[in-house]
């Protein structure tokens, strides 16, 4: 029954348009115990991580989803003409990182940190559903407040915002890159 259950879970993850949470899997597979489901998921994850397939199952944005193996990115980018990862301009990426690290945040606060008007970048991020409006700040003018979305987590392969690199980690990476370039 475990192999059958693994096949079912694999199918559910495959057809899901968003990361499929463990709770959602359990709500669909009511005829199986929670323990059976968790064991099958662990076996499925182990199976995908230990074999030589071009795809893997990862945990991101609070659920499970299929992703390509990072080592194949060069060929995937050739196929997609760099569309997926290169759709965000440097200014949009800068705006997105400010939102990710300072959320909840207003447009005025984003623009102040960047030193330029961020309206266009923010509009792009809203259209791509990487950020969302979560309310209004209790301040003069009642400006809108922005946060990152679950789609942001999935796009960057993060399980939660806690997976973002810390300031110390970023500084270490930048120092290492400077050492390599020197």
Image: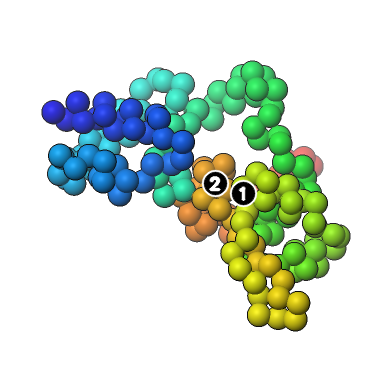
Residue placed at 71% from the left, 75% from the top? Answer: 142
Q: Nearer the viewer, residue 28 or 69?
A: 28
Total numbered labels placed on residues in the image: 2
Q: Residue 130, labelled with which disc?
A: 1
The picture places residue 61, in percent across and down from the top left corner, at 46, 48
Is residue 175 visible from the viewing direction of this image?
no
- For numbered disc 2, what is the local secondary structure? helix
Q: Earlier in the sequence, mark 1 or mark 2?
A: 1
The picture places residue 39, in percent across and down from the top left corner, at 21, 39
Q: CA distance from mark 1 to mark 2?
A: 6 Å
- Picture layout, residue 1 above or below residue 119: above
- For numbered disc 1, what is the local secondary structure? loop
Answer whether labels 1 and 2 touch (C-beta < 8 Å): yes
Report the quarter where the C terminus lies.
top right
Residue placed at 39% from the left, 29% from the top? Answer: 14
Q: Is residue 101 left or right of residue 67?
A: right
- Picture layout, residue 181 above or below residue 6: below
Q: Which residue is mark 2?
A: 151
The picture places residue 81, in percent across and down from the top left corner, at 70, 22
Residue placed at 55% from the left, 23% from the top? Answer: 72
The picture places residue 101, in percent across and down from the top left corner, at 63, 61
Is residue 122 visible from the viewing direction of this image?
yes
- Picture layout, residue 115 above or below residue 159: below
Crowd rating for badge 2 (residues with CA inside 10 Å; few <14, some 14–19, many 20+): some
Q: Nearer the viewer, residue 181 or 82?
A: 82
Q: Is residue 59 left or right of residue 2?
A: right
Q: Is residue 11 left or right of residue 153?
A: left
Residue placed at 66% from the left, 35% from the top? Answer: 85
Crowd rating for badge 1 (residues with CA inside 10 Å; few <14, some 14–19, many 20+): many
């Amino acid at each position: 029954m475990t192999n059958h259950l693994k096949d079912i879970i694999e199918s559910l993850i495959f057809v899901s348009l968003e990361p499929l949470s463990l709770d959602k899997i359990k709500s669909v597979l009511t005829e199986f115990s929670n323990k059976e489901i968790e064991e099958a998921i662990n076996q499925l994850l182990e199976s995908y991580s230990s074999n030589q397939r071009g795809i893997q199952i990862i945990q991101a944005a609070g659920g499970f989803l299929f992703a390509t193996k990072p080592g194949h990115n060069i060929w995937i980018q050739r196929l997609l003409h760099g569309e997926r990862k290169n759709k965000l301009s440097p200014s949009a990426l800068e705006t997105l990182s400010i939102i990710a690290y300072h959320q909840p945040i207003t447009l005025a606060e984003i623009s102040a940190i960047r030193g330029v008007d961020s309206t266009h970048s923010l509009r792009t991020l809203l259209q791509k559903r990487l950020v969302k409006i979560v309310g209004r700040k209790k301040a003069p003018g009642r400006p809108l407040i922005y946060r990152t979305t679950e789609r942001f987590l999935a796009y960057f392969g993060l399980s939660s915002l806690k997976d973002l690199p810390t300031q110390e980690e970023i500084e270490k990476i930048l120092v290492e890159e400077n050492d390599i370039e020197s």
